[in-house]
Every structure is written in structure tokens, then in C-alpha cells.
Amino acid sequence: GDSVTQMEGPVTLSEEAFLTINCTYTATGYPSLFWYVQYPGEGLQLLLKATKADDKGSNKGFEATYRKETTSFHLEKGSVQVSDSAVYFCALSRGTYKYIFGTGTRLKVLA
Amino acid sequence: DAGVTQSPTHLIKTRGQQVTLRCSPKSGHDTVSWYQQALGQGPQFIFQYYEEEERQRGNFPDRFSGHQFPNYSSELNVNALLLGDSALYLCASSSVPGTANYNEQFFGPGTRLTVL
């Protein structure tokens, strides 16, 4: 069945460092791919998405490219801020149906 | 425009009890999905409601049931609570195919359920 694998955290970075959080997926066909962010005590917020191969999703300085050949959707940001500290979830879906989430990666950014 | 709302925010129950959680979808959305997020884990799909019927179900026992009302709001019911049911329960809404961003789910803040 479909699945999502994320790199384990926590990831601890200094402010202004480069961020990469790896995400790979297993699925047949062409699912849509998403990154969600969860701040402490809150629900999930959509960060970015891509719906077809080679699409690049971007938002708030974060980027991720849908790579069909490597079944990956790695999240990157050139310069992280303390306010980026949160848990990041990679997810896939087919159409309007269920999302399948990874286990999440906790990011801690130090001033 | 209100987003997805859920109630209550927190809930404490004892084993064997029953609980009902509520969700109102984002304006313009007609599909509601429920997820269970255990501590330190990613959300797990419970089921999805569309046109007042359960359209798809994840790997959860029959103790978990739901309902969708004509105004698209939804309830999640859990019977015979177990300690392992303690989790954050998330509701997400989405719109029909053909509308903008139909494959995008918007999540509510969740209901934190603690079973003692």
C-alpha cells in the first residue's frame, strides 16, 4: 500500500542555517504530495504542495520538488528562523480521499 | 471566513465511556475527514464523509463511528473507550472535484482526548 517515510528528528539548527528534511514515498501512479507544519498545541497547516512530477511547491521561503524518478519530495529552506521551530509532516493523497502522513520531523532552531 | 472548527478543545474520559467530537467544515466545503494523531506520530485516517455517507474508512474498529449532517458538519463517536484511544483527533474539510484546490484538506485545531 501507499506509504510515506520521513527522516527522523529532531533536527536542531542555528538561525540562518540551511534546512533539508527528507521525504520519500511509495505509491502507484501520480499522487499529490504535501508538506504540513504543526506548531505546538495546534492543528496542521498546509505549507506547500505539488500535484504532478517536476512541480515545485513553495511558500514562506520553503520549497519542495516532486521527483518521480526518486519518489521524493524533500523540504528545503535557505535560511531558517527561530519561528520555524515546529513539527513538519510530509503527506500524499489521491484525489479527494485520505491523506497518508509520515511520522513527522521536529525542527528546533536556536537563536 | 471561518476555517474548520472543532469542539470541545479538550476532553477527559474514563475507560469504557463513550465520547462525541464535533466538527464544522470550512465555508464552501462539503467533505469531512477525521484523523487520529497519537503523541509523537503522524495523523492516521479514520474515515471520510460526503453527502452524509461514509465514503472511505481507514483501519479502525467499529467502535469508531461518525455522522454528517445536511449542513456538512460532522460528529465522530467512539464507544467503549480504551486507554489507547488517547490522542489528538483532527477534522479536515475539502471541496468537491472541479473546484479550486479540491484535493487540499484544511485541518481544524483538533480535540485532545485523554482516557484515564
Image (cartoon, grey):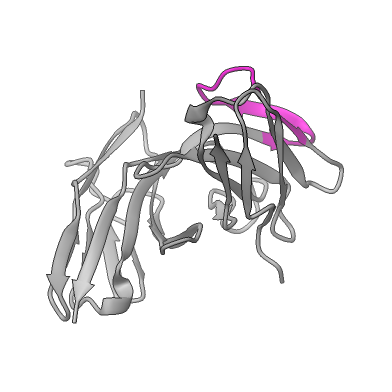
Question: Residue A76 in magenta?
Answer: no
Where is A85 relative to B13, above or below? below
Residue B45 makes an appearance in the image: yes
Read off the magenta span. B49-67
Quick one: which residue is furthest to the top in this view? B62
Residue B93 makes an appearance in the image: no
Left or right: B65, with A85 as reference point: right
Report x, y in % for residue A24: 23, 42
Number of numbered callouts drawn: 0
Report x, y in % for residue B116: 54, 34
Left or right: A47, with B16 as reference point: left
Where is A32 relative to B86, above or below? below
Question: Residue B60 in magenta?
Answer: yes
Nearest to the observer: residue A58 or residue B41 = B41
Nearest to the observer: residue A58 or residue A80 = A80
Quarter the N terminus of chain A occupies: top left
Residue at coordinates 71% horizontally, 71% vertically from top-left? B1
